[in-house]
Image: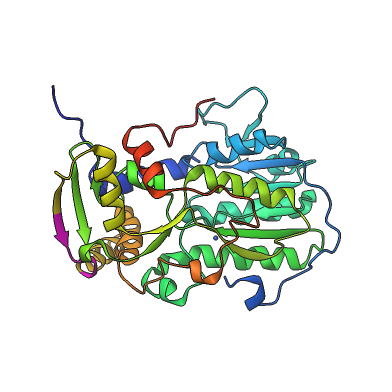
């Protein structure tokens, strides 16, 4: 029987871009916030933009289980399917379409590609006109408030600009607030699709700098749970960044968990330099190669002191009521194929 092939890292990053396309600077105590409301209105009707990507289905699933009235905004060409309890509104994202689609919506969750920030800006402006109360921008992932990350991964300026635009819009609409969620990489997704440097099918690993660098990672389902919790407490978390993490880990720890999950230590391990990979990824990015952009995220994350670990800033897991998760358990579920897919 032929061996099942795990995507190469380049293929994985290209895949990531494709599904995101189909489908966030300082914490509140570090900077002034805008228009904090002492009495926030109840949030009941929630719209999700980009729900057909890798994160969107987990958000929709959790919103439904938390009894939010859930609407999905999708382009007319979208083939994504959702439960009958989800209101799906398709259109061209024109101002006229958004004005109609956002009537009665209390909150919007956006899971839009970093490269489509203009689309997010347009939605934010339409949301303000429609009276939307809370925005959750597409900030999930790296801590873009970190000056080191801003320096080594300059394309994150798109996200920085997006939140600045939200702040500007919110400043003119006292009833609107925003919350950005910093999560680190999506652990189950990145492990399954080879972005951590592991070939699960063939038991191969590429460790950068011996796999020693620590970083935060969060599972897709926990991101969904965090969003539902934020929206259930509209009087809290206004106009600020929140940090969550399923666990602080490293490539070396993940490899140990994979060896345990697979029942063997017989994994082929290749050692490489994270700095060399960073330089190679940057060269790709400068040539317009999208895969290089995503490789740059991980090449820097796998280096000590480059912003991958942010638990020291204070995690909101307990306050949000997020589940305790175990690296070995989650990794075993990914290895055995029991995670990452939402089944309606």
**Is 58 within the magenta?**
no
Q: How many numbered dots are placed on residues in this image?
A: 0
In front of the other: 7 or 265: 265
**Is residue 54 rendered to the left or right of residue 175?**
left
Q: Quadrant of residue 281?
A: bottom left
Q: How has the structure been colored for display?
A: rainbow
Tell me the magenta residue range.
270-275
Q: Quadrant of residue 290?
A: bottom left
Q: Position of residue 202 (x, y in %)?
A: 17, 38
In front of the other: 234 or 286: 234
Residue at the image position 66 percent from the left and 75 percent from the top = 29
Query: Image quadrant for the C terminus?
Result: top right
**Is residue 217 rendered to the left or right of residue 264?**
right
Q: Position of residue 331 (x, y in %)?
A: 36, 43
**Is residue 131 rendered to the left or right of residue 163?**
right
> Farthest residue in the right direction?
39
Residue at the image position 36 percent from the left and 47 percent from the top = 190
Q: Position of residue 178 (x, y in %)?
A: 68, 59
Q: Position of residue 32 (x, y in %)?
A: 70, 77
**Is residue 59 rendered to the left or right of residue 35?**
left
Residue at the image position 27 percent from the left and 61 percent from the top = 287
Asked whether residue 51 is in view, the answer is no
Asked whether residue 335 is in view, the answer is yes
User: Taking 157 as reference, is 247 above or below it?
Assistant: above
Query: Image quadrant for the N terminus?
Result: top left
């Amino acid at each position: 029987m032929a061996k099942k092939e795990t995507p190469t890292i380049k293929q994985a990053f290209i895949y990531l871009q494709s599904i995101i396309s189909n489908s966030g600077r300082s914490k509140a105590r570090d900077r002034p916030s805008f228009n904090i409301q002492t009495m926030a209105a109840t949030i009941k009707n929630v719209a999700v933009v980009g729900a057909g990507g890798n994160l969107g289905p987990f958000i929709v699933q959790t919103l439904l289980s938390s009894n939010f009235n859930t609407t999905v905004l999708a382009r007319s060409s979208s083939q994504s399917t959702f439960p009958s309890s989800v209101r799906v509104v398709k259109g061209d994202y024109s101002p006229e379409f958004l004005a109609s689609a956002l009537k009665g919506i209390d909150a919007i969750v956006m899971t839009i590609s970093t490269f489509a920030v203009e689309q997010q800006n347009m939605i934010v402006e339409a949301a303000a006109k429609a009276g939307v109360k809370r925005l959750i921008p597409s900030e999930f992932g790296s801590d873009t408030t970190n000056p080191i990350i801003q320096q080594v991964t300059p394309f994150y300026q798109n996200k920085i600009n997006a939140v600045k635009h939200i702040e500007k819009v919110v400043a003119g609409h006292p009833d609107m607030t925003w919350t950005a969620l910093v999560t680190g990489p999506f652990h189950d997704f990145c492990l399954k699709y080879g972005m951590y440097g592991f070939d699960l099918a063939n038991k191969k690993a590429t460790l950068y700098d011996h796999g020693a660098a620590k970083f935060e990672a969060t599972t897709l389902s926990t991101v969904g749970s965090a969003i539902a919790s934020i929206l259930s407490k509209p009087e809290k978390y206004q106009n600020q960044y929140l940090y969550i993490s399923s666990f602080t880990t490293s490539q070396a720890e993940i490899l140990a968990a994979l060896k345990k999950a697979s029942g063997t230590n017989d994994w082929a391990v290749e050692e490489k330099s994270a700095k060399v990979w960073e330089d190679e990824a940057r060269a790709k990015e400068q040539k317009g190669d999208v895969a290089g952009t995503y490789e740059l995220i991980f090449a820097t994350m796998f280096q000590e002191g480059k912003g991958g670990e942010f638990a020291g800033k204070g995690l909101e897991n307990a306050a949000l009521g997020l589940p305790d998760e175990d690296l070995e358990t989650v990794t075993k579920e990914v290895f055995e194929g029991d995670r990452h897919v939402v089944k309606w």
